[in-house]
Each structure stands twice: as structure tokens, then as C-alpha cells.
């Protein structure tokens, strides 16, 4: 189970937490005062009151220890930059996701050590455009894959010694056998390129490759178990 | 008998689609400000008017050849046809006849021709007395040789340009809007010229009778002086006359400054409208465009995307600072409140606008704009932004087709990044058509070859395509598993090989752009063939 520290209370932080599987992730919500702590605790999340400007306080909540991911969701870019720099200095391997208010601050956050920058307005703008030009596809994916229906995209890594190692993609026949659609394979050795599963040259799976599949979660789970069985 | 025949003709004209279409065509050609053909016609007419004026100037000291005369006659004929067509378009004579006939039948009174002709003539005279129609007539009449004296009035042809130049019309409107100020100024100027003329006549006539011989000379001198032109052909020689001249020059300066300030302020007031007019004209040139209401952060990103994909759009924002930002970026901007009916109508919500995007940061405003847009155009696509989850339902109720929540989408992106970064990037790449592979929808038409075929028969694999699923509202498919409910239909994920496709279904396929295009073309060809067979 991965541990996530969420800094900054907003609609977005609650939304992210509700979307991530509770069985796979545990959260600690960092708040600035008692009243905020009470409110978030009411939502069923663990809270801690610390001053994020203090490195010792950051260490006390598990950064550099058991915290794997940090969400910097403060409304002010400067706060997020400061938190990113502090957290990165403590733990080099930490995954830091930060939101950005001013687009110009994105580069600063990257320089500070964030792994992923999220600009809500940019995403929203792109989404609106997608909806405008490809309404059918966007609607279908929104209601199913990105919506609350049990249809998901998933990535499944082929480990060394997996039953699928050295198998041709055309032999997988996932749509018939597992009720899954194989969209493609990401070859991590050749620089994360995605080989699409249809109409392309035959691809032989190697250890380290990642299958990108689409399907119901139960089917994904059972396929994963089968792939991981050595 | 004649009455019955005329009423029959009037009825025929009322119902005849040919007559209606012809009149519509000429309306679009001559009057409809939104039609493209009118703008082209206007350009042709401007050229013809300028050419005819050129001929007029040429005629002053040169004998016209037969060809020149012929050209002149052709031009005049065109002007006469245009004048008559405009008179025809002004109102419908058959409607007057029929209305009078109905009235007479209802009251059991006789059909009075006198009254009908009076009504018809009064309408046509009303047209003839309109300022632009008078100009048109004055541009034609002097060409009639017996009215040679009036040939100077041919210069009125230049005034015809008012019809075709929007900016000239605007200048006339500017003058019209400052009618009161200009009237006051004219009265004051008249008074000044009167005082100056009588003054100079009084002082100068007896002493300087050679120059100021009549009252006309005095009025001429006053106008030349008050306008600060001062030719110097008449110069006062008495002290009284010079005092009048000094007073007239000083007050003349005041009058000129007053006149300029009136015109400048009127043009300034109209500047906003002038700029908007140019935007409306630009929008009329587009086949389709998107209306972005609100140029905040989201609106800016949408504009960026639309610009990247070379799609036309117009921004409406009532905040000066946002409008200025959009203008600096070179976008078409209307600085106005997008929730006002006339703003959306002027922009073209009922014409060529393809979608309205409500992207202000205020949900209340977004609901209001959504409602206004839906009321004005029930068929237009509306995508609205909701900043709070509570307002999503309200936006749908107001008529939005889609509602976007920035923070929800961003949260989804974060969650997917944490859970499935590779898969998420892959699917995003497909949706945004950044990769060679795309996801597309293909409709199944009733006359298409695949209507009634099952999935195995279509053989997507051979076509190098991947069928992700089928979207359908057809209840026949309900028995199949893997169905996910969408708004009014179901999405059947990974349908079985025996899934039979029906007309109205939508195939969601994944593949290379060229492969999908080829399949689409084959489907269209099959429809064409089946249409020919029938």
C-alpha cells in the first residue's frame, strides 16, 4: 500500500482521494488549523496539523520515510514551490504531484523537483475542446472509462519469467479469452513507445514491457493474476 | 372578371414557391445584410458607380464615342433595374390585394379598386421618398437628355455609394446621432453669418462698394472669414469692418473647435460599435465558428486549442481586462455581456455558430448564459463550466449538452497519473490524435452493407481495425452483456462475434487514421450502390 500526503484542502484534493482505491493507497491530510482538521476528519481522512515550512515537521509526517507520494495542492504557487523543494531535499525518490495556478509557475515547479504538474484550467480547456471536436468518443470515454462505470484502462507489466514472456501480441486474443481489449504495448527499453496492437508488425513481449488494456476491473484483476503467476 | 383574375394572380403569387424563391434571391442580393451575395453585389455596384462618374468627368471636355454612350446606357439600365427591384422588394402588393379582398368578403362589401390602388401607391411612394431611394432616382433622372440641365445632379451617383459602403453609412449615423448639437451649431453659425454680413455691409458698402457691392458679397465674405479660409479677395477697409472681421475670426475658431469636438466625440462613441461591426463582418465570412463566453483561464486554454486546430471562434467577455487580453492575442473579441439576447444574436448564434462555450468563473453567470443560448437556439451545442458540483444539475437543466468541472477533471488526471500513468498517457494520446492511432465513431446507416451483419462477418481484424464497442439505443441489444448505460443509450463494450449490428448503432473503433477513413469510404460506397439499386 502506498502512502500519500496531501497538502492543501480544496475540492480537488477530496476528489482525488475519492477516486483512488482505498485498498491500494492510504492518505494523510495536512491541514493548517484545528477547524480544517475537524472538517476533513469528518470526511473520514487522517489529518495532521503541521507547518509545511518546517523540514522537521515534514519528516514527522513520514516524508523521507513511509510517504511515497506528495500532493501539493495549495492555491498559491509559491507555497507549492517551497513545499516541493523541501520535500525533494528530504527524499529524492518521492513522487511529487503539484497543481499550478499561473502557467508560468509550471517551469519553476519542475525545477523545484516536481514529477508531474497539473494545470486544472489547461486540462479543462483541452477537455472542452475534445468534447467539441470529438463529442461521441469523449462522451463514451467520460461515461465509462473516466466515469464511475466499471470500465477501466489499466497497465500490466510483464515481469521476468511471466507466462506471457516471448508471446506474440497476435496470440494473446484477449478480447475473446478475457473480455479485455489490448490497446497496445509500451516497450520501456525503446523509450516508452507505444506499439498498437492492431495492424502493426508482430510484437514479441519481453520482460519489462507494459500492456495497456481496457476492460472491466474484475477481468483486469484476473488477467493480472495470470500474468504475474510465474 | 378582371378583379377575379387579379385576385387569382395574387393568390398564385402568395403560394408560388418560385415567386417566393425569386423574391428571396433578390432580397439576399440587394437588401439582406447577412448574405454573402450582397457583399459581392455591393463591390460590383461600387465599381460601376465609380466608372459612371469617371465617364461623367471624361465627358466634360471630350466628345463621347458611340461605345461610351452605349456603356453609359447599360449602366443607367442597370441602375434603373436596381431601383425598380428595390421598389418591388419594399413590400408585397399581392398581400395588400388579398388583405383587402378578405376584408371585403368578410364584410360583404364590394371590392374597391380605388382604395387598393391608393394603398399600393402610398407604400411605393413611401419607398420613393426614403433618402437613399431619392439619391438613386437623382442618379438616374439627369441621364434623360431632355433634362440636360439637371446633368450636374449626376454627381448624386457618388451618394449612391452610401448604399454599398458600411463605413459611409456609419458616418451618416454619426452625424444623425449628434443631430441636436449640430442643429444648435448651425443656428449659431447662421446667426453669426447674418450679424457678420449685415455688419460688413453696413460699414463697407458705402466706402468699399467695389468689393462689397451687394449683400451677397457680404454673406460670401462672412462665410469665407468665419471658416478661417480667408481668400483675401474682399478685405475690410474701415475700422468698423475690421472690428467685425476680428470678431468673426475669433468666433469662427470657436465654432470650428465646437464642430470638431462634436464629430470626434460622436466617432469615439461609435468606435466600439465600429469595431464590433468589423468582427460581425468577419464572422459572417466563416462557415462555422465557436462562441466562447468568458475569457478567464479556461476560456484562454480553449481558445489556444481552437487556434492550434485552426478553428474559428469569437470571444465574448464583459470584463475590460479580459477583452483586452484576448484582443492582444489577436482573437475576435466582443466586449459585452454574453447573457444579453442581442449580443448572442448579433454574433450569430442562429446563423453559423456551431457551439457556445460558457466558461466564466461564476456558475450563476454560466447558468444564465446557457439558458439564454438554449432559448435562442434550441439545436446549438452548449458546453458549460461548473465550478461547484452542486451546480452541475442546474446547468443541465438550463440546457447544457455537456458540463465540465475543472477540478474534477484535474483530480481524475492526478488519480490516473498515480495509478496508471502509462495507460493514461496512451489513451490521452489517442483521444487527442497525437499518435498515429485514433479512436473514431462510425455510424451504421440503414442502407449500409453492415446493417444486419454480425461482428464476426464485418471482420475488423482483417481491416486492421479494433472494435472497442458499440453505442446504441436499440433495445434489441439489451440481451448482450458488458453494457454500460450512457445518457439515452448503452455502450456495449467488446461485443461478442454474434452481436448483430443495426441501423442507428455507432461503432467505436480504434486504428490508423487511414484504415478508418478507408472503412468509412467503403461503407459510404455501399450506401451509394444500394441507393442506386433501389
Image (cartoon, rainbow, N blue to C red):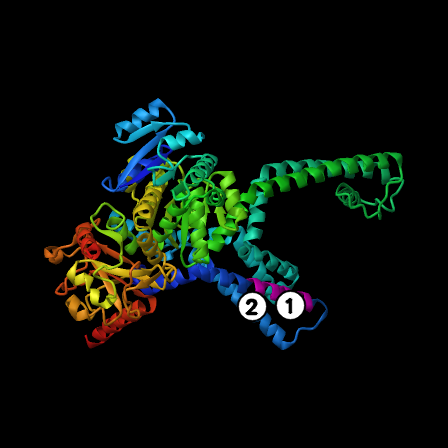
Image check: A92 left or right of B79?
Answer: left
First-in-chain label (1 vs 2): 1
Q: Which quarter shows the C terminus of chain B?
A: bottom left
Q: Chain of mark 2?
A: B
Residue B363 image offset from top left, x and y in percent: 36, 36
How far apart in space, not on screen, are marks 1 and 2 (Cα)? 11 Å
Q: Is the residue A72 above or below the residue B38 in the image?
A: above
Magenta segment, prevailing SS (helix, strand or loop): helix
Question: Do marks 1 and 2 share a subunit?
Answer: yes
- Residue sitting at x 21%, y 47%: A149
Residue at image mark 1 = B55
The reply to whether discs 1 and 2 touch (Cβ–Cβ < 8 Å) is yes
**Residue B34 is at least partly visible in this image:** no
Span colored in magenta: B46-59
Image check: A153 left or right of A57?
Answer: left
Residue B80 image offset from top left, x and y in percent: 52, 64
> Helix or strand or loop: what does disc 1 sit on?
helix
Q: Nearer the viewer, residue A196 or B351?
A: A196
- Does the magenta run of residues contain B54? yes
Residue at image mark 2 = B75
Q: Which quarter shows the N terminus of chain B?
A: bottom left
Count of numbered circles in the view: 2
Q: Nearer the viewer, residue B20 or B5?
A: B20
Q: Nearer the viewer, residue A230 or B394?
A: A230
Q: Nearer the viewer, residue B267 or B397?
A: B397
Q: Is the residue A190 above or below the residue B409 in the image?
A: below
**Residue A229 is at least partly visible in this image:** yes
Residue B121 image offset from top left, x and y in percent: 43, 54
Number of residues whose C-alpha sits closer than 10 Å to that of mark 1, classed few (under 14), some (14–19) or many (20 or more): some
Amino acid at each position: 500500500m502506498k502512502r500519500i500526503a496531501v497538502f492543501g484542502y480544496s475540492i480537488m484534493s477530496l476528489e482525488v482521494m475519492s477516486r483512488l482505491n482505498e485498498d491500494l493507497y492510504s492518505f494523510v491530510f495536512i491541514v493548517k488549523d484545528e477547524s480544517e482538521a475537524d472538517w476533513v476528519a469528518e470526511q473520514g481522512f487522517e489529518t495532521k496539523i503541521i507547518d509545511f515550512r518546517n523540514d522537521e515537521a515534514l519528516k514527522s509526517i513520514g516524508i523521507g520515510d513511509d510517504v511515497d507520494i506528495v500532493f501539493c495542492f495549495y492555491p498559491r504557487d509559491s507555497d507549492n514551490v517551497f513545499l516541493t523543494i523541501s520535500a525533494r531535499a528530504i527524499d529524492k525518490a518521492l513522487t511529487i504531484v503539484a497543481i499550478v495556478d499561473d502557467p508560468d509557475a509550471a517551469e519553476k515547479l519542475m525545477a523545484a523537483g516536481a514529477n508531474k504538474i497539473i494545470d486544472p484550467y489547461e486540462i479543462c480547456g483541452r477537455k472542452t475542446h475534445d468534447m467539441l471536436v470529438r463529442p461521441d468518443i469523449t462522451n463514451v470515454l467520460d461515461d465509462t472509462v473516466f466515469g464511475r462505470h466499471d470500465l477501466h484502462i489499466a497497465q500490466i507489466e510483464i515481469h521476468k519469467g511471466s507466462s506471457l514472456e516471448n508471446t506474440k501480441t497476435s496470440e494473446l486474443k484477449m478480447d475473446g479469452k478475457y473480455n479485455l481489449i489490448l490497446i497496445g504495448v509500451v516497450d520501456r527499453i525503446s523509450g516508452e513507445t507505444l506499439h498498437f496492437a492492431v495492424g502493426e508488425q508482430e510484437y514479441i513481449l519481453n520482460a519489462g514491457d507494459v500492456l495497456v488494456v481496457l476492460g472491466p476491473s474484475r477481468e483486469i484483476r484476473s488477467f493480472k493474476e495470470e500474468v504475474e503467476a510465474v | 372578371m378582371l378583379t377575379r383574375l387579379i385576385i387569382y394572380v395574387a393568390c398564385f403569387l402568395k403560394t408560388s414557391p418560385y415567386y417566393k424563391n425569386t423574391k428571396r434571391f433578390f432580397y439576399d442580393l440587394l437588401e439582406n445584410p447577412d448574405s454573402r451575395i450582397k457583399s459581392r453585389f455591393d463591390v460590383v455596384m461600387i465599381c460601376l458607380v465609380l466608372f459612371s462618374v469617371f465617364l461623367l468627368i471624361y465627358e466634360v471636355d471630350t466628345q463621347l464615342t458611340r461605345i461610351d454612350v452605349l456603356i453609359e446606357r447599360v449602366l443607367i439600365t442597370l441602375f434603373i433595374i436596381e431601383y425598380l427591384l428595390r421598389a418591388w422588394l419594399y413590400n408585397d402588393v399581392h398581400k395588400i390585394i388579398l388583405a383587402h379582398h378578405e376584408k371585403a368578403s368578410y364584410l360583404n362589401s364590394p371590392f374597391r379598386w380605388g382604395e387598393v390602388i391608393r394603398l399600393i401607391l402610398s407604400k411605393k411612394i413611401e419607398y420613393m421618398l426614403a433618402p437613399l431611394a431619392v439619391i438613386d432616382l437623382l442618379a438616374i433622372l439627369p441621364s434623360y437628355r431632355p433634362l440636360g440641365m439637371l446633368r450636374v445632379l449626376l454627381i448624386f451617383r457618388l451618394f449612391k455609394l452610401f448604399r454599398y459602403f458600411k463605413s459611409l453609412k456609419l458616418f451618416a449615423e454619426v452625424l444623425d446621432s449628434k443631430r441636436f448639437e449640430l442643429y444648435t451649431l448651425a443656428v449659431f453659425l447662421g446667426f453669426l453669418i447674418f450679424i457678420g454680413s449685415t455688419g460688413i455691409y453696413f460699414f463697407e458698402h458705402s466706402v468699399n462698394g467695389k468689393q462689397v457691392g451687394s449683400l451677397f458679397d457680404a454673406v460670401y465674405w462672412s462665410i469665407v472669414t468665419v471658416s478661417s479660409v480667408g481668400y483675401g479677395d474682399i478685405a475690410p477697409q474701415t475700422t468698423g469692418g475690421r472690428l467685425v472681421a476680428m470678431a468673426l475670426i475669433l468666433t469662427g475658431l470657436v465654432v470650428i473647435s465646437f464642430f470638431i469636438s462634436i464629430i470626434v466625440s460622436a466617432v469615439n462613441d461609435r468606435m466600439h460599435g465600429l469595431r464590433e461591426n468589423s468582427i460581425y463582418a468577419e464572422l459572417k465570412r466563416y462557415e462555422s465558428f465557436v462562441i466562447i463566453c468568458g475569457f478567464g483561464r479556461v476560456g484562454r486554454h480553449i481558445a489556444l486549442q481552437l487556434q492550434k486546430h485552426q478553428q474559428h471562434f469569437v470571444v465574448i467577455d464583459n470584463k475590460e481586462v479580459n477583452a483586452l487580453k484576448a484582443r492582444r492575442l489577436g482573437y475576435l473579441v466582443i466586449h459585452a455581456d454574453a447573457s444579453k439576447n442581442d449580443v448572442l444574436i448579433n454574433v450569430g448564434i442562429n446563423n453559423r455558430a456551431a457551439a457556445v462555450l460558457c466558461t466564466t468563473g461564476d456558475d450563476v453567470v454560466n447558468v444564465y448564459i446557457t439558458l439564454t443560448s438554449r432559448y435562442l437556439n434550441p439545436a446549438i451545442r452548449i458546453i458549460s463550466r461548473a465550478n461547484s458540483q452542486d451546480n452541475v444539475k442546474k446547468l443541465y437543466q438550463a440546457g447544457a449538452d455537456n458540463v465540465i468541472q475543472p477540478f474534477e477533471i484535474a483530480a481524475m488526471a492526478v488519480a490516473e497519473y498515480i495509478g496508471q500513468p502509462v495507460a493514461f498517457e496512451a489513451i490521452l494520446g489517442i483521444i487527442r490524435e497525437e499518435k498515429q492511432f485514433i479512436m473514431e465513431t462510425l455510424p451504421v446507416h440503414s442502407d449500409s452493407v453492415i446493417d444486419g451483419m454480425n461482428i464476426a462477418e464485418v471482420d475488423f481484424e482483417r481491416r486492421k481495425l479494433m472494435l472497442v464497442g458499440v453505442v446504441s439505443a436499440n433495445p434489441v441489444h439489451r440481451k448482450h452483456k458488458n453494457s454500460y448505460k450512457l445518457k439515452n443509450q448503452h455502450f456495449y463494450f467488446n461485443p461478442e462475434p454474434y452481436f448483430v449490428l443495426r441501423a442507428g448503432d455507432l461503432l467505436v473503433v480504434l486504428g490508423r487514421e487511414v484504415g478508418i477513413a478507408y472503412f468509412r469510404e467503403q461503407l459510404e460506397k455501399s450506401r451509394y450502390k444500394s441507393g442506386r439499386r433501389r
